[in-house]
Image (spheres, coloured by chain):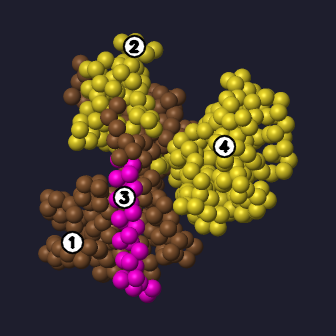
Chain colours: A brown, B yellow
Amino acid sequence: MAGNSRDPGRSVTARALSVLTAFDAEHGRLTLTAIARRAGIPLATAHRLVRELEMWGALERDQEGRYAVGLRLWEIGLLAPVNSRLREAALPHLQELCRTTHDNVHLAVRDEVDAMYVEKLTTPRAVSIVSRAGGRLPLHATGVGKVLLAHAPASVVHECCERGLARHTPYTITEPGRLGRELQAVRSRGFAQANEEMTLGNCSVAVPVHDPDGTVVAALGVVTHSARAEVAKLVKPLLPAAEGITQRLGEQDRSGLASLPR
Amino acid sequence: MAGNSRDPGRSVTARALSVLTAFDAEHGRLTLTAIARRAGIPLATAHRLVRELEMWGALERDQEGRYAVGLRLWEIGLLAPVNSRLREAALPHLQELCRTTHDNVHLAVRDEVDAMYVEKLTTPRAVSIVSRAGGRLPLHATGVGKVLLAHAPASVVHECCERGLARHTPYTITEPGRLGRELQAVRSRGFAQANEEMTLGNCSVAVPVHDPDGTVVAALGVVTHSARAEVAKLVKPLLPAAEGITQRLGEQDRSGLASLPR
């Protein structure tokens, strides 16, 4: 229907959304010309859409005339259940884990075939890592990713293998058969680990976070220096923290804050 | 121009955005009917726009058929400089403050005549407070709000007073003259405090956070129980934390991550 003059609304909405997708972590500030090019729309159209989006607060303009995602879009994005329900429930537990482990602490959900980081807390002692809140990493090469993949439908595992298991280090699991056995092990022992499979020198351990109804909604993990890693010691504080998050999710749901029909 | 058939794009974009503004903290999940009603658009239009927004990931539908803000909109919202630049720079300092004070720690920016909470960290010992990340509170009745107002243009102070200084407790400052003197004191002593002015029993103390160019971009505050509050002791860890945030903002800018033209 896009481009159909009898249904201009659809294509206009799609084009307005394409302006937003011109932005990403590496392209946080864009000129109008760059927006038009990245969104694949004519400059005049970009000009009109950007003006509307700016008026509404979805975009904001800096002193040099470049555009960035605006305060109002950030504000509305925070209403997403992944933030308003999951992250809010998890944050005190993430802080506590960070305090006790002095390592990077992660909360991630699965979006299609990516692990998506909902929050990352770090401390001065923690190793440097590539994740950030809102960022994506592969499912097969990280602790949180393996947890999410181990509890995903078989079709998701299949699709990951079809797309190819990218090798990030010499230790990344790239054979589908070996990945399948690894995911089985993750399910049976209740946690996942990844040893230098994403970044040389780093080791991650992760456990599932269950919704009160029993489904796995997220993964909670720590990333530390391989040389410091004692798996049993890392898993120990993760399990009660994951249970604590489940409990808080239940309390939220009962209080009706997150799910009341209106 | 809205509704002008020769410029359907503008009104369509505006209507698509109005669908998003149907959601707020008290209305996180909405039926299609509720969206149409709250957005002030016909049901058929709402149906079409919601379908497009859902396909794109700006909205998601739960098992009961209600809609919520989607993962993709949350992801794009996180690209806003208030998160990707300010919150990222501040988070380690907020964690450290939370660890040392055991109180609620806040980072807020000003949006027109509201204080907007960018992040809130809490601990089990902290008092219960009404703020949340993405939430808004009045400028005249909170520690962070007074800091932001003290460093805002005079026109903002004037507008706050014109709108009326709402009384939240018997201790809220509601006289413009008294507020002006209070803001002068905030500027001269370098920090703000609010004693039970927003919530009875709670006291907040806050300091400005400067951009490397010297402008005040945010306020950093702690909220504690009035009975526990020793202002000097509360201000002490805030000042080096605010300086640390300024330093990290400068490092980010120099590394070009946040401001490189593309």
Give amino acid for label 4: Leu
Give amino acid for label 1: Arg
Q: Earlier in the sequence, mark 3 or mark 1?
A: 1
Q: Which residue is mark 3?
A: A247
The answer to which of A256 and B257 lies nearer the viewer is A256
Residue at 29%, 60% (x, y): give it: A210
Q: Secondary structure at mark 3?
A: helix
Query: Would you identify the image quadrant in which residue B158 lies?
Result: top right
Residue at 50%, 75% (x, y): give it: A100
Residue B39 image offset from top left, x and y in percent: 39, 23
Q: Secondary structure at mark 2?
A: loop
- Badge 1 sits on which subunit? A
Give amino acid for label 3: Gln
Residue at 40%, 29% (x, y): give it: B22
Nearer to us: label 4 or label 3: 4
Task: Judge whether B70 appears above or below A200 on screen.
Answer: above
Q: Which residues are magenta?
A: A227-253
Task: Judge whether B251 appears above or below A227 on screen.
Answer: above
Task: Judge whether B175 appears above or below A200 on screen.
Answer: above
Nearer to us: label 3 or label 1: 3
- Badge 4 sits on which subunit? B
Q: Classify mark 4: residues with Cα within 10 Å, few (<14), some (14-19) or many (20+).
A: some
